[in-house]
Amino acid sequence: MKDFTEYLAFTKELAFDSGKILSKYFGNLNSINQKTTSIDLVTNADIESEQLIINSILKKFPNHKIIAEEATQEEKNSDFKWVIDPLDGTTNFVHNLPIFAVSIGLQYKNKTVIGVVYNPAADKMFSASIKKGAYLNEKKIKSSSTNTLSKSLIVTGFPYLHDKKWEKSFSIFKDFYSKTQGVRRLGAASLDLCFVGMGRFEAFYEFNLKPWDICAGSLIAEEAGATVTDWDGSKYPESGKRIIASNGYIHKDSIEILKKHSSIFFEQ
Ligand code: IPD
Ligand code: CA
Ligand code: CA
């Protein structure tokens, strides 16, 4: 296997620099714009953070493909693809809640090989490179060893689009709530995945996410020992359509809950 560690330092530096931009705006926003709906927001911080990341990648790797939340890039022919959320947790950010992050993943031949999620408000840098483990700052992280749902704390999220699936998702929420020690909704999917990786939560599930919400965080969770799949236990879609990440021990029981409710979530 190719050695990707040279990309790790570059990606961490990039996340740190864009984190500085987010910190500059945090608590000082003077413009917030709506995207698809009145609760789907974008700020100058998202845009400036993304510009910095894209420009730095293009300068160093002009041939690499890039997909990022706020801008579309021209199609390129390369084995490398960067998948970027310049600000994950925008709603928290806008409300001065320090649960937000910059998330940068790198894929090689369609496989994620580097993942970095940086929360500047707490100066927490989560990182992983494939087959080399996952780290929080310089310390190796590991998912929890809790092996029953009844002793587990779960985290989830809900999409901006309030459609039929969204309605149905509350039955799943209720089911998890009744079988566990609790379910949290923090508002930044990339961090939810990292928190499964560091053992704070036993599992995270969500639907209707985007590739940039899950790319980096999934690798971090997996490298920390977590199991990441689709809601039926098969390989998770990189689109972010459905995802469950768990410590592995409670995966089967979690999938059972998801499967019970999930036919609508597999409809096109
Ligand atoms: C959102 C967050 C949130 C999730 C939403 C995402 P954004 O990303 O990850 O936790 O529930 O579905 O869209 O818009 O803050 O980058
Ligand atoms: Ca996001
Ligand atoms: Ca975002």
Image (cartoon, rainbow, N blue to C red):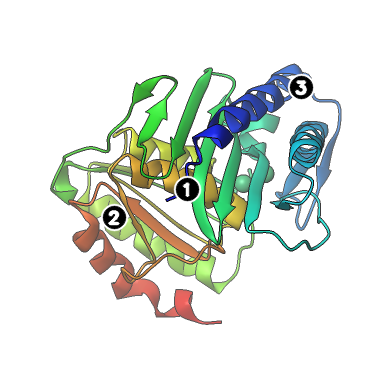
- What number is the disc on residue 25? 3
Marks 2, 3: nearer the viewer: 3
> Is ligand 1 within 8 Å of the beta carbon of the residue shown at mark 2?
no
Q: Is residue 94 above or below residue 36?
A: above
* Camera-nearest label, 2 or 1: 1
**Residue drawn at the location 55% of the way across and 61% of the way down:** 110
Horizontal side, residue 195 vs residue 104: left or right: left
| Mark 1 CB lies closer than 8 A to ligand 2 | no
Classed neighbour count for the residue bearing mark 1: other residues with Cα under 10 Å, few (<14), some (14–19), many (≥20): few
**Disc 2 marks which amino acid?**
Phe
Q: Which residue is mark 1?
A: 2
Q: SS for tag 1?
A: loop
First along the sequence among labels 3 and 1: 1
State the residue at coordinates (45%, 39%): 129
Classify the position of the C terminus by image quarter.
bottom right
**Is label 3 or label 1 in front?**
1
Circles 3, 1 touching at the beta carbon (< 8 Å): no
Dot label at residue 266 = none
Q: Identify which residue, 159 or 19, lies in the foreground.
A: 19
Residue kind at label 3, given as amino acid type:
Tyr
Would you place residue 2 above or below residue 266 in this image? above
Question: Looking at the image, in which quadrant does ligand 3 appear?
Answer: top right
Pointer 2 or 1: first along the chain? 1
Residue type at mark 1? Lys
Horizontal and vertical percent position of residue 122 = 52, 18
Disc 2 residue crowd, few under 14, some 14–19, many 20+, Cα 10 Å: many
Q: CA distance from mark 2 to mark 1?
A: 40 Å
Outermost residue on the front side: it is 2
Q: CA distance from mark 2 to mark 3?
A: 36 Å
C-alpha separation, residue under disc 3 versus residue under disc 1: 38 Å
Provide the secondary structure element on which disc 2 rests.
helix
* In the depicted structure, whether residue 145 falls above or below residue 36: above
